[in-house]
Image (cartoon, rainbow, N blue to C red):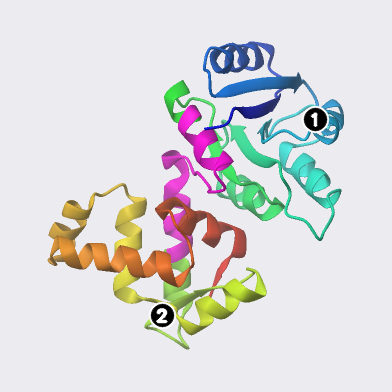
Amino acid sequence: MNTIRVVLIEDHELTRVGIRAALQKLDDFEVIGDARDAKSGLKLLESTQPDIAIVDVGLPDMSGIELTQHFLNSMDKEQTPKTKILIMTMQDSEDTVLAAFAAGADSYCMKDTSIDKLVDALQITASGNSWIDPAIARIVLQQTQKASIAANARPQTTAINGLSPESSHIVETYPLTVRELDVLKLIVDGCSNAAIAEKLYISVGTVKTHVRNILNKLCLSDRTQIAVCALRGGLVA
């Protein structure tokens, strides 16, 4: 695996220094710069084009969410941004989580996570997938439940809007069934396939089929991406 080039934008000095020191001990990472405010961070991102930027939400001059918007808006609209954005924060409020993904963040990690989980989040994000901290997974579950209740016109399915035209077409053609939503809710709760099978009174093989169908319908390769996809696009009736 190639070395992952990281930029760290964090105003809290101890946190910034600690994360940098931890990552520099690992062969797979290279911290190529850090900044303590959004203005300096934006300049650093534009000049270095790292693989990943770890961005704190609570920066002194503008929020990390605003920084993400400014940075992505400055990119060539015809190209997929090379730099992935991992939001790191102590805030697990629904508004903050939804705003971060709506702004274009790729992953969301709580500051009190372990270094091992942070490494996992960075590696998964660098590979082109998304990572969402288990601590905020219930927000996704709540959004899914709201959408399911609101889906009066199509009570047996739910849809995800706000995606690319190609993805929207796929979701409209192959919406998630109620049973697939049941499985999704239990995945978000952290249940294993065996636990899901026990709770829903179905076989493990059937659970695996439902999980595979969910991923295939949304053209995703990871369970976590389903949650991020829903957060970014917004679940509607």
**Viewer-closest of 41 and 82:** 82
132 vs 159: above or below: above
Residue at the (59%, 12%) spot, across then down: 18
Residue at the (37%, 52%) spot, across then down: 188
Q: Is residue 140 magenta?
A: yes
**Residue under circle 2?**
157
Q: Secondary structure at mark 2?
A: strand
Q: Secondary structure at mark 1?
A: helix
Q: Is residue 75 magenta?
A: no
208 vs 195: above or below: below
**Viewer-closest of 80 and 200:** 80
Residue at the (21%, 57%) spot, across then down: 196
43 vs 67: above or below: above
Q: Amino acid at mark 1?
A: Thr
Quick one: label 1 or label 2, which is nearer the N terminus? 1
User: Residue 84, percent across and down?
Assistant: 66, 42
User: Residue 81, percent across and down?
Assistant: 74, 49
Question: Quick check: 151 left or right of 199?
Answer: right
**Residue under circle 1?**
48
Q: Amino acid at mark 2?
A: Thr
Quick check: can you spot residue 237? Answer: no
Query: From this viewpoint, which residue is outermost toward the front?
Result: 1
Q: Are there few (<14), some (14-19), or many (20+) residues within 10 Å of tag 1?
A: some
Query: Which callout, 1 or 2, points to the residue nearer the camera?
Result: 1
Residue extent of the magenta highlight: 119-144
For marks 1 and 2, give the CA distance: 44 Å
User: Residue 30, percent across and down?
Assistant: 64, 21
**Quadrant of res 91:** top right
Count of numbered tags: 2
Question: Quick check: 6 left or right of 175?
Answer: right
Q: Main secondary structure of the magenta part?
A: helix
